[in-house]
């Protein structure tokens, strides 16, 4: 049994307290003290009787806490947090500011096994999955007292490879007795783990889904993302179709533009063809008429074009501004909602694909 109370959803805490002979509502006290008030010591939960607090300790229960070991601020305002794990490992989160939105990009694993060639985290390999408490605590600690409005599970690691902890973190962050971050403000990003996408479609809680796509064909994607060998694009898009049939949620595609690899007009045209290819007829028919127009005929989506961020040990080059604008123009002309994401946090290695790169390793 997981003994860290911070890793538990409200429902899991309810099962714990009733199993120890207490009424269910007691779980609400524990949950809000930990997740809303930041209590890290069971003895400080004074809404519980002294004897029950002692019982929890006797059962081996505890409340974990991440440690901030470094905080780096880029001139553009982006902040990178480096957190120390209890086993000595390091993970990173990035806080981005956009008008009144404060978006935290959190890690879900220490390292990553997916091997995407454009990503510095891949070079670390997978160290381990993070516990739900370690994911949630990044949100608790980043930004000080300022409220985090959006959380993207897009930092170090592949979220759907740590499915249960990520879903528990989503439930904890969304709960109104805790940080109460709206479900539409919680986004899980995947390199395309098909079973995870299908599983997500059947959940009773529906965070937003982002797909790190980065190529219009299997041949190009395989060179960038080894996962494509296991899950070719047809299989990935079938899973996305199933996800949309069930949830009716729009999907975000992340597309990192790399010079001469995936950034030409032809690549953009191939991407349009892929995104507008009809999903199964039932999927389209079931969309409400007022949302069908968002994608024309195909997958209901928006595309984020990301400037590639170079890092040491990788020879890929970023696309020029003109190439990015041209690529964006092709998508927009086809009626696909497209946003160009400018580089943020580059001087502190906090930009997309840079987490876990050299500067952070040197902190150890
Ligand atoms: S891009 Fe994401 S999935 Fe790919 S190696 Fe990096 S962290 Fe892992």
Image: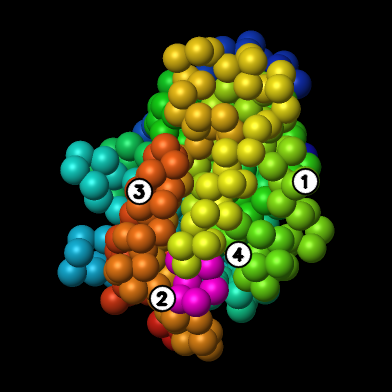
Q: Is residue 132 visible?
A: no
What secondary structure is marked by label 1?
helix
Dominant SS in magenta = loop
Look at discs 4 and 2 and give the one toward the viewer.
2
User: Does 216 appear above or below 24?
Assistant: below
Per the rendered image, the range of residues in magenta is 256-262
Instruction: Return the residue nearer the eye: 145 or 313.
Output: 313
Instruction: Return the residue nearer the eye: 38 or 148.
Output: 148
What secondary structure is marked by label 2?
loop
Per the image, is 334 magenta? no
| First along the sequence among labels 1 and 2 | 1
363 relative to 247 in the view: left or right:
left
Q: Are marks 2 and 3 in contact (CB under 8 Å)?
A: no
Query: In the displayed image of the protein, which residue is found farthest to the right?
Result: 230
Q: Which residue is mark 1?
A: 235
Ligand 1 has an atom within 8 Å of the beta carbon of the residue at disc 3 = no
**Rendered image quadrant of residue 69:** bottom left
Point out which mark residue 110 bears: 4
| Residue beneath the point at 51% across and 21% down | 292
Distance (Cα) linking label 1 and label 2:
29 Å
The x, y position of residue 196, in whole percent, is 72, 42
| First along the sequence among labels 4 and 1 | 4
Q: Which residue is mark 2?
A: 318
Look at discs 4 and 1 and give the one toward the viewer.
1
Q: Quadrant of the N terminus?
A: top right
Count of residue discs: 4
Q: Quadrant of ligand 1?
A: bottom right
């Amino acid at each position: 049994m997981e003994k860290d109370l911070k890793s538990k959803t409200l429902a899991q805490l309810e099962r714990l307290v009733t199993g120890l002979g207490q009424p269910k509502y007691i779980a609400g006290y524990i949950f809000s003290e930990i997740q809303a008030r930041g209590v890290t010591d069971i003895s400080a939960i004074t809404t519980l009787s002294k004897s029950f607090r002692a019982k929890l300790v006797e059962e081996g229960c505890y409340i974990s806490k991440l440690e901030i070991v470094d905080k780096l601020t880029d001139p553009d305002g982006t902040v990178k947090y480096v957190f120390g794990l209890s086993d000595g490992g390091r993970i990173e989160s990035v806080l981005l500011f956009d008008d009144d939105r404060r978006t935290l990009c959190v890690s879900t694993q220490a390292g990553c096994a997916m091997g995407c060639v454009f990503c510095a985290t891949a070079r670390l390999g997978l160290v381990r999955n993070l516990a739900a408490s370690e994911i949630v605590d990044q949100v608790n600690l980043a930004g000080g007292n300022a409220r985090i409005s959006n959380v993207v599970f897009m930092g170090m690691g592949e979220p759907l490879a740590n499915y249960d902890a990520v879903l528990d973190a989503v439930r904890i962050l969304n709960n109104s007795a805790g940080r109460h971050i709206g479900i539409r403000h919680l986004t899980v990003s995947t390199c395309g783990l098909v079973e995870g996408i299908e599983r997500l479609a059947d959940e009773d809680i529906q965070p937003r889904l982002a797909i790190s796509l980065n190529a219009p064909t299997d041949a190009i994607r395989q060179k960038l993302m080894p996962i494509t060998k296991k899950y070719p694009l047809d299989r990935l898009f079938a899973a996305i179709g199933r996800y949309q049939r069930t949830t009716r949620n729009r999907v975000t595609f992340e597309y990192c533009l790399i010079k001469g690899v995936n950034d030409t007009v032809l690549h953009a045209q191939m991407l349009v063809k892929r995104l507008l290819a009809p999903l199964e007829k039932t999927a389209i028919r079931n969309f409400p008429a007022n949302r069908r127009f968002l994608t024309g005929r195909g997958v209901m989506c928006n595309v984020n074009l990301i400037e590639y961020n170079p890092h040491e040990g990788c020879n890929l080059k970023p696309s020029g501004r003109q190439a990015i604008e041209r690529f964006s123009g092709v998508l927009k002309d086809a009626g696909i909602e497209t946003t160009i994401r400018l580089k943020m946090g580059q001087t502190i290695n906090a930009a997309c694909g840079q987490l876990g790169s050299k500067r952070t390793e040197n902190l150890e």
